[in-house]
Image (spheres, rainbow, N blue to C red):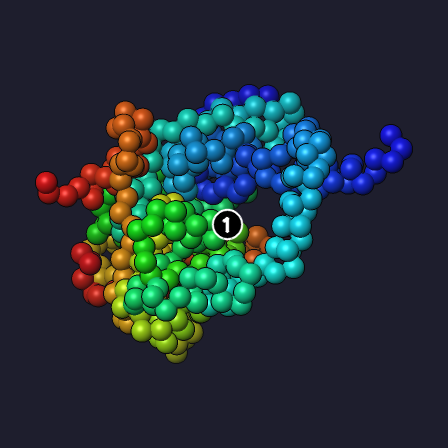
Amino acid sequence: MPGTDDIEALIEQMAKLPGLGPRSARRAVLHLIRKRAILLAPLARAMQTVADTARECVNCGNVGTADLCDICAQDSRANGELCVVEDVADLWAMERARVFKGRYHVLGGTLSALDAIGPDELRIPKLKERVATENIREVILALNATIDGQTTAHYIAEQLEAHVRLSSLAQGVPIGGELDYLDDGTISAAMRARKAL
Amino acid sequence: MEWRDTGVLLGLRRHGETAAIIDVFTPDHGRHLGVVRGGTSRKIAPHLQPGAQLDLVWRARLEDHLGAFTVEPVFSRSAAAMADRTGLAGLNAALALLSFCLPERAPHPDLYARTLALLDHLETPALFPLAYLGWEQRLLEDMGFGLSLDRCAVTGAADDLAFVSPRSGRAVSRAGAGAWADRLLPLPPVLQRPYDAPRTEIAQALAVTGHFLGQHLAPALGDKPLPTARQRFVDGLARQNNSPMD
């Protein structure tokens, strides 16, 4: 159709987003165009602002709009606890739970033999530097309960165990979980980590 | 084309938004790759952890296509592996070596059986390093670079064997080595006869098998460096106390 090249270009870009394909991107774009004033224009402004200002925190690897993210900028969060996570999405998940009041360190991935990702590809040297300079008392390894996640956790533990107290998240039955639906690995981990009542 | 087999998951990588390409080692079809649709979903992803034993159905229109797997978990080893640092490092080393060494779609049923036996040792962490050493010797044998450690290559004697020839992989006795001793690899006793050896000795034995993996097998496979996961496992053993039960 003549005069729709820009719209087609927008649909093409939207279709690259996770969870969207060409058809759902087309529906989303049509919805945005119909609500141009209340949805499309503010969204475009917000996206432009983030595109101009978003960056990685130089300290922890979180994303924010300043060199130091909000968490690293707060003195109250310098309580000596450092939580190591794989990805920014994991940091956001921890923040949603509101149980951790210290600072974070985002590795940016995990060690992976198959993908040839070694320690130098992750932010492990920066982690060692932070442990040495930020008066850290405890490092909490909040990495995924996967083979790659735990391989990375053990590697970090080897690097840091002489310098700081280390802990990791417990593994076992999730809240609301029913044993019948759990995989045998989770049940086995839960049995190993059972506690006295 | 369709076949059904069991297999050990060697690794996986994401394919698109929801699918995964898995690399499995099966007894009848060897190392085989294929797509698992929905392989990154919350339902299937926990079962697709390296080392897991899977029931597999592979389908493709033509035999040389990548094809798609339907997977069902048989047995997960993740919890046992994650509980022990040495076991986890050993699991990574074994799976990375299998991916490194094995050609696709060539069956190695004996090596598969030995691999299953090795993975079962994840439940007994104290015995795992010794089992790993035996497995790696078997891997070398299967790849055509087996060590011959029962007699001296020079004198034919069966006693006082102290060295391994770095070229032939055959044992050499002290008398047979003579002035060449410093050019030969040391032969740790555990390499000849499995026993409750200290972990440092197992690490020395793995240095010998590592020589043949790196200097003989790797050049035959395109001269890629050995997987770093193996070296991490060996380094971890070398750092450990001398007790076999550590």
Which chain hosts label 1? A
Residue positioned most to the right: A2
Q: Indicate whether B6 appears above or below A16.
A: above
Residue at (57, 52) in percent of width and height: B221
Q: Secondary structure at mark 1?
A: loop
Query: Residue B97: x percent and y percent?
Result: 45, 50
The residue type indicated by label 1 comes to Leu
* Residue A124 lies in quadrant: bottom left
Total of numbered circles in the picture? 1
Q: Quadrant of residue B71?
A: top left
For image coordinates 65% across by 25% down, the residue present is B62
Q: Position of residue A135 (x, y in %)?
A: 31, 73
Compared with B111, B136 (above or below) is below
In the image, A127: left or right of B17?
left
Going 53% across and 67% down the picture, which residue do you hit?
A67
Q: Quadrant of the N terminus of chain A?
A: top right
Instruction: Answer whether residue B159 is visible to the viewer in this image.
Output: no
Furthest-left residue in view? Answer: A197
Left/right of residue A9 with respect to residue A154 in the rendered view: right
User: Which residue is rendered at x = 35% and y = 73% of the image?
Assistant: A134
Residue under numbered circle 1: A114
Q: Front-most of A9 and B240?
A: A9
Q: Tell which of A136 and B41 is nearer to you.
A: A136
Whether residue B41 is visible, yes or no, is yes
Answer with left or right where residue B83 lies relative to residue B100.
left
Q: Residues within 10 Å of mark 1 (few under 14, many from 20)?
A: some
For the C terminus of chain A, the image quarter is: top left
